[in-house]
Amino acid sequence: ETLFQGIRKLMPGHRLVYENGTVRVTQYWDVPHREADEDPSTSDADLIAQFRDLLTESVRLRLMADVPLGAFLSGGIDSAAVTAAMARQVDRPIDTFSVAFQDRAFSELEYSRQSARAIGARVHEIVVSEHRPVPLWQHMMVGATLHDLFDDDRVNTDVVQAIRNAENRGSWV
């Protein structure tokens, strides 16, 4: 489901093909699982170390920039892991950006704040409420592609930018 009636997301690793008036959705990739013939003596600790090394290297390759970089920090494990990997590789505090709902039942700010504190980040937060309902979709859609609109993290970072533009305040985005 998406915010738009009649428009749905594809599951990760799937593709949609429209051909001769027919729509077909197929899976083209899935997370590889340990094969029965793989070395069963590889410990969980070794696999975790391999994953940590791959994540660290992946983040390092993306830190090559002429300008300061920041990170979207949602409160989930994936953004927390990427942001922590960034923090270990730079010599200044990371700027983190979080978007949350005022209703605590739907907010992940508590978790993003914990992650930000743990790495010593400079935190930037925007809280959306019924009183700040975001007439932002119009701002977000200008010049956006379908991929931009339906990629979760992109929508959240666009909310940050759109709020800044709509309110004409702040210089951190």
Image (spheres, rainbow, N blue to C red):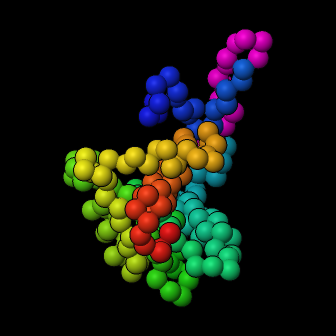
Looking at the picture, does residue 156 appear above or below residue 51? above
Looking at the picture, does residue 138 appear above or below residue 60? above
Q: Foreground: 116 or 135? A: 135
Q: Is residue 33 magenta?
A: yes
Percent x, y for residue 155?
50, 49
Looking at the picture, does residue 82 appear above or below residue 135? below
Whether residue 75 is visible, yes or no, is no
| 50 sits left or right of 153 in the view | right
Percent x, y for residue 146?
61, 39
Percent x, y for residue 157?
49, 57
Please identify the quarter of the rendering in which residue 64 is found. bottom right
Q: Is residue 82 magenta?
A: no
**What residue is shown at x 47% (from left), y 75% (from top)?**
171
**What residue is shown at x 58% (from left), y 47% (from top)?**
142
Q: Residue furthest bottom?
A: 91
Percent x, y for residue 161?
49, 60
Please identify the quarter of the rendering in which residue 20 is found. top right
Quarter of the image where the N terminus is located: top left
Q: Residue furthest top?
A: 21
Whether residue 141 is visible, yes or no, is yes
Q: Foreground: 2 or 134? A: 134
Magenta segment: 19-35
Q: Residue furthest left?
A: 104
Numbered disc total: 0
Q: Residue furthest right?
A: 20
**What residue is shown at x 44% (from left), y 58% (from top)?**
166
**What residue is shown at x 21% (from left), y 52% (from top)?**
104
Looking at the picture, does residue 32 appear above or below residue 153? above
